[in-house]
Image (tube, helix red, strand yellow):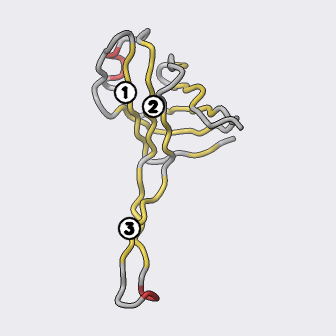
Amino acid sequence: MELFKVKKVISRAMGELPLQGDGSTFKPQAYKRETKVGETPSNTGYVETPTAAELKIKLNAVLDPQDYRNLTDDTLTIYLSNGSVHVMPQAWSVEPVELQQGEYEVTFNSGMSERIQ
């Protein structure tokens, strides 16, 4: 059985991103549910709060780290190893990129994500 992994990421602004083999995570947009305990079990429920979609990727440093500095309103297409494809529209880079030993990590957020395949 193959585990799902981020296989490829295409940025509308920058093209295919140079992913490293490991170190990428994708969290689709969802809802965080906080339990609210009532005076009786039948009065217990939850409150939903939307969460942003998040993509954390480790990249080979073949693109200038400054290219990610002002990256906003990008569309990211995420291909997973199981064949499914997700889109993060209007995505933005969250933090400044720190160049390490020939690599760097970039975190993107988006208000939503959608599985398109």
Q: Which mark is residue 71?
A: 1
Q: Which residue is mark 3?
A: 34
**Up-down relation of residue 41 to residue 76 (above or below):** below
- CB contact under 8 Å: marks 1 and 2: yes
- The residue depicted at 42 percent of the width and 87 percent of the height is 43
Residue 37 placed where, x, y %? Answer: 36, 80
Measure the C-alpha gap from mark 3 to mark 1.
32 Å
- The quadrant of the rendering that contains the C terminus is top right
Q: Is residue 37 left or right of residue 88?
A: left
**Up-down relation of residue 30 to residue 24 (above or below):** below
Q: Secondary structure at mark 3?
A: strand
- CB contact under 8 Å: marks 2 and 3: no
- CB contact under 8 Å: marks 3 and 1: no
> Residue 10 occupies which quadrant of the picture?
top right
Mark 3 or mark 1: whose residue is earlier in sequence: 3
Q: Amino acid at mark 1?
A: Leu
Q: Secondary structure at mark 2?
A: strand
